Image: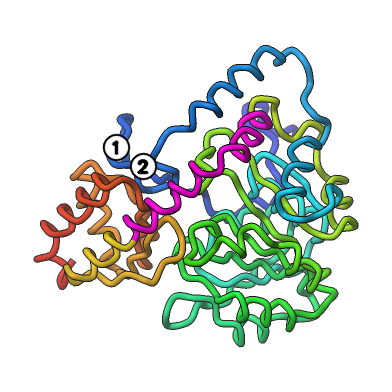
Amino acid sequence: MRPDRATPPAPSARLDGLPGYGKGRATGARVAAHRLGSNEAPDTVHPAIARAVTAALSGANRYPDLRGETLAAALAARHGLAAAQVAVSAGSIVLLDQIVRGWCDSGDEIVAPWRSYEAYPIIAGLSGAELVQVPLDAEHGVDPAAFLAALTERSRIALICNPNNPTGTALEPQALDALIAAIPAHILVVLDEAYCDFADGAEAVAKSPAARLSRHPNLVILRTFSKAWGLAGLRVGYAMAAPEIIKHIHAVQPPFPLPGVALAAALAALDHEPAVTARIARNATERRRLSEGLRAKGVPVAPSQANFVWLPLGERSAALNAHLAQMDIAARCFDGEGLRITTGTAEDTDAVLDAVASWRPHIGSA
């Protein structure tokens, strides 16, 4: 019997049950006044970056670098690496997808602390791999002992987000090194450092991955221009690893991974790092103000090293999220677990604290 022509072909069974990626904005067509759901930088790009993007448009009729070599070389010089140790692409999450497709087959395991970045289950599921979710500790951080205990003979990738999204918690550098060192050498360790620039005392860690890579030859470090560098709308990320690992990432990467305007923006950003330093300093101020203000109002807040705070409110999360939406504030709700609020401007912080103050009478019964 011929199938119904009105029914489109079914996709792979790998798509069955995959979670969707959530929105970080209030529902409805209008954008919220306080966009605190997607961990974006609250300020606009540096004028020099805007000029570089405009100039790059004049060459939009030509293909950009085949593999983003110009940017890769600049990043290698910044981080004390060889150019062959850097790969660039349209966001660090695209690089993670390429890594998973290059290293995992159906039935393999990817071990990750959980809760963590919500795109991880999607990427794992599309490859046919199983995402083994290791519960966080009581302080909402990575539990190294539990993580190591979850590794099996089927483990192909150990995936660690540090600082962790959405909780903002981070392992200290020595603890992180000890965890990586304890992972068997045949397992690829992927360290997602999208938020490392925001961590207290992060300057040395953010600028010097070469030493860590030399200690751990099975390590890949992922970074992004979307957060501290303020280029979320242009989707620029990069991976740093041993040349042999980068070669295999390139093998599964389509040509021209970044458009010319994105390459130009990232290169210009590297030339104007004081703007990034100022952005990080403002984030630290508002993160502290937001955390202390929420705790003073009786709301639990995990210790954050990122550009957001995590409110582990459990079943009360959706109620607070709805209340914030009524106040024109978009946050990211993980129903039944917690609420993540991006640290934005001083006005954003004031708006959140005022909104929570008006919700406080309901905190015990929400």
Where is residue 152? Give x, y as percent.
Answer: 75, 81
Residue at x 61%, y 81% (from the top left corner)? 175
Q: Which residues are magenta?
A: 262-287
- List x then y, in percent, for residue 224: 61, 48
Provide the secondary structure element on which disc 1 rests: loop
Neighbourhood count class around disc 1 (C-alpha, 10 Å): few under 14, some 14–19, many 20 upward: many
Q: Amino acid at mark 2?
A: Arg
Q: Amino acid at mark 1?
A: Ala
Colour scheme shown: rainbow
Coordinates of residue 257 in the picture (x, y in percent): 74, 35
Can you say whether 182 is above or below 102 in the image? below
Contact flag, marks 2 and 1 (Cβ < 8 Å): yes
Residue displayed at 78% across by 53% down: 101
The residue under label 2 is 25
Which numbered disc flags the more N-terminal residue, 2 or 1?
A: 2
In the rendered structure, the answer to whether residue 145 lies left or right of residue 325 reads: right
Q: Secondary structure at mark 2?
A: loop
| Vertical order, 99 against 130 (above or below) | above
Q: Quadrant of residue 193?
A: bottom right
Which residue carries the number 1 mark? 32
Quadrant where the image shows the C terminus: bottom left
Q: Main secondary structure of the magenta part?
A: helix
In the picture, measured across the screen, residue 1 lies left or right of residue 202, that is right
Asked where in the image residue 345 lies, by quadrant, the reply is top left
Q: Quick check: is 282 in the magenta stretch?
A: yes
Give me the C-alpha separation between circle 2 and circle 1: 7 Å
